[in-house]
Structures are given as structure tokens and as C-alpha cells.
Image (cartoon, rainbow, N blue to C red):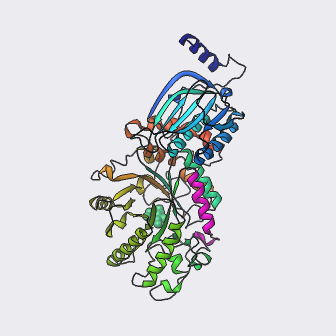
Amino acid sequence: MNIFIKNLVLILLITGAFSCEKHLPVFTMDQVALIPYPNSVSPSVEVLNVKKIKSIQFDESNSTLVEMGLDLQSFWTAHTQLEVGLKNKAENNSNAISLEVKDFSNQNEEYYQLQMGENQISILGQTAAGVYRGVKTLEQIISLSHLSGVQTIKALPTGTIEDAPVYGYRGAMLDVSRHFFSVEEVKRYIDLLSIYKINFLHLHLSDDQGWRIEIKAWPKLTSIGGKTEVGGAEGGFYTQLDYKEIVAYAQRRFITIVPEIDMPGHTNAALASYAELNCDNEIKSLYTGIEVGFSTLCVDKELTYEFVADVISEISAMTPGAYFHIGGDESHVTPKKDYIKFMNRVIDIVKQNNKIPMGWDEVVLADIPEVTVAQYWAKAENAIMAMDKKANVLMSPASYAYLDMKYDSITKLGLKWAGYISVQKGYEWDPAELVPELDPTRIIGIEAPIWSETLEDFDDIAQMAFPRLLGYSEIGWTKSEKRNWENYSSRLSYHSAILDSLDVKYYPSNEVNWK
Ligand code: TNX
């Protein structure tokens, strides 16, 4: 087609004059309000009429691609009301969406290319994870092409996106201890994380108020320690089957589960389950308040280490991911020398289970091996000490990245000990610059924790996490020179369409002109 005819077709499609169908895309590819914004977008003038797509094709011997194809097939049909078949990879890409793993030597493992032409879409990824991130970009392009009131997509913009993340670790943390969240609720959170290319979900599985994961060698942890939650209502726990189901569900969405057992403090639920874990052999009562820093495992008892070894080995055996989080925060009643002695032994147990130890920033007081990840939440000096010990740092600064902090003085839910975090404040910071002394090459990424002292159900979680989580996803993925609040907040305003369609009760902050 020569350029004149192309432009004419484009204009006709956009104005709806070409067919009786209205509501064709008004966006070119670079104008789509993608979050996280891709690192390179080259729009072209053609329009892709969705009726031209007849199939999704991929290498059928690759079971991961088969799963992706099936998921994309239902997404496509839901948004276009058109059926597409699935077929084995063919030479000819036209009239198809093709998904393919391809070696682009030296590229990041999540690198992908998304090419959209008049009658075909192709997604090439350095690995299956890369293909998956590309599929998520395509799905956002589709979702954001719903103009107000339009249920069915007729046409899509074209062009090429080349993209890869700045950080390999883009995480969220969910506290299922203070209030328990069901397997279905965790899956729903995972679905939402996947839309925004988050690739780690850290589960805070134990704390003073509840032990939430079945340990076969210590059954009372859940039968007693899992009974209640903050406020005294019924708690709950994941059986090992439940946990495996969560891990597999996350894996299909290229999200790695990081299990956390918080030690030696934050352990009242365990101390209330087994008298013998206490130094004085006196069993503790279950705790349903929200104080921190009053409990500790008994560092001098050999039984404590047998307990920890059982817990870490049972959970590690069900966890394909590389990390095991051992907590280590706010152990205010554990003398420092005991803390160090305890953490050193626990780190050895983690290593024996072939996992990489991760801990809240206080963990740097122990003799941490170089692979350790210190999660910076409170003390910059700890992050710097991690670097001096040649360990790595995960950025979760409480005053910028804590999803349980209130947005402002009128937010009903949440806490405010680290200050208010507006949508803008949560977005406008750079992990590589926050602690100037920190060597940026030691930073593996960012994680946004959500602590659930005040959060009782999924709608409460949604209100605190959304929309701020989208900002953390962009900080983790998009180069800092491509990020600015004005541009981001205008893109964010369109994501109400995605969140509303999924019945996510986000906080409609007036910092954003929601569409
Ligand atoms: C501090 S952050 C804690 C948690 C609380 C949180 C509430 C961290 C490592 N410890 O035990 O839930 O504040 O915001």
C-alpha cells in the first residue's frame, strides 16, 4: 500500500467511516497509556483490524508456551468477541499472533520484542519469561483500547516495542499473618501483579499474631498458632497443598514466591503453640494486638535450631524459587550477641537447603555470606553495611514503598508511622539514588510490602495497593530518565478502566484526573 492510501485507511478507520463500526483506536502505539512504560516504542501508521487474526501459534512442544497461548486465547476472545484457534508454529506469521523464544544474545532474560502489523502480531522473548512480559504488554494495549463504553475491541495500533526491565527483582509482599488471606485472595493478588510485570511475591507467613503454613513435623503451629488474627477473629493457614497451589499459580504467571518465616522476634504464635520453644518452658497466650518487638525464640536451646531446621527444610522443599526470607526485624528483646549467634546458625540452615538467605536490613549484623539479600526498610546504615559485606540490597524504604502507610490524613485504613505516602510521593524516587553511599550495582530491585494490621479483606488490600503498586512496577521496570510524574499520572488515569473491569476497589486519589 502506498503511504497516501495507508493514511487514508487510517483516517477512515479512526473516524469510523470505513465500516459501520465506530470506536476504532484513537491512540498510536506510543500514546497507549502503558504501565510500566516500555523502554522503546516505535509506532507505525497502519491499523490492525482484529478480525484479521485467526490463530495463536507457538512451538507446541514447549508446555510453557502452550499455557501462555491458552491464556491469551481466552483474553483475546473476551475482549474482541472473536474466536482464535491455537496451532503449531508455522513459517507464515500472517493472520496470527505468534509467540516465540529466541536467543538475542546478551539480552536480559525478560527482554522481549512485540511487533504489531496490519494482519499479524509477533512476540519474541529472550526466554519464556520475556515472551510472557510481551504478552502482558499486548494485553494492556488491548485493555486500554476500550474507549469509554465500548465492550468489544475492533482495531489496534501497530508498531514495535523493544523492552527489558531495569531491575530483575520487582516485588510485592503480603502479610498473611496479622490478617489471614485465603488462597483465592492470594491468587487474585497474583493476577493483578502479573498485569504490571511484578515478578516476585514475598509471603510473610508467620508473626506474633499467626502461623500460616502447615509444618508436618510441628502440627500445633497451625492448629493452635493459626487459630486467630489481629482483633481476635478466626485466623487460618495454608496446608502444604494450598501453598504448592499458590506457588504453581504464581509460576504460570512468571512470579516467584519468596516464603518468609520471621525470626527470632515476631514469633509469639510459635511460642503459643509449643511450651518447649520458650526458655522457661511456659506456653505463651495467643496475641491479637498490634504491638511489635516483644517476642523471641530461645536462642540457647538446641531444640530451637531443630525446630528452625524442620520449618526451613519443609518449606524449601515446596519452593522452587531461590530465596528464603528469615525476617530478623525488630527483635527488641533478643540481646544483640544472641541475635548474631542465632542468625548465623539460621543462615547456615538456609544454605544447607540450597536457598539464598534474605532478611530485613537488621540481618547485616550477622556474618552474612555474599549472596545474602538485605531488605532495606528502615536504616540506611544497614544497607551500607550490607554493601560493605559484599551482599545485595533490596529496596523497600518504609517512607516511600510501604503500601500500608496512609495516602493522606483522611485515609481510613493503614498506619502512618513512616509518614503519609501519596501516589506522587510513592512514584517520585529512584532506588539507585535514595541512599547516596549505596553502590547501585548492589541493588537487585524493589519491593512494596503491605502489612495487614488494619487490613481485613481483599478490598482493604486493594485500596492500599492500588494505584500505588503501579508506580512501584514502573520504578522497577522503566529507566529513570524515562520516568516523570506528569506523564505517569496522565497514563495512570486510564488504568481505572482496567481496575474497574476487575472490580478492584482502588483509592481514587485526587492527585489523578481519573478517566
Ligand atoms: C514494621 S517493616 C514491621 C512490621 C509491621 C510494620 C507496620 C518491618 C520489617 N517490621 O512488623 O507490620 O512495621 O507498618
Q: Is residue 104 visible?
A: yes
| Stretch of the chain drawn in magenta | 228-254
Q: Quadrant of the rendered structure where residue 26 is?
A: top right
365 relative to 458, above or below? below
Quarter containing the C terminus: top right
Q: Position of residue 31 (x, y in %)?
A: 52, 29
Say whether residue 323 is magenta: no
Q: Residue at x 61, y 15 (%)?
A: 9
Q: Is residue 143 above or below residue 175?
A: above
Placement of the N terminus among the 4 image quadrants:
top right
Front-lying residue, 393 or 405: 393
Point 47% across, 84% down: residue: 278
- Between 78 and 229, the residue placed more toward the observer is 78
Location of residue 155 in the rendering, given as x and y in whole percent from the top left corner: 64, 27
Residue 436: horizontal and vertical position, in percent?
Answer: 28, 50
Does residue 24 sit above or below 168 in this rendering?
above
- Total tally of numbered discs in the picture: 0
One can see residue 514 in this view = no
Q: Is residue 232 magenta?
A: yes
For residue 425, side relative to residue 50 (left or right) = left
Query: Which image quadrant for residue 495?
Result: top right
- The residue at 34%/50% (across/down) is 434
Residue 377 position in % (x across, y down): 40, 59
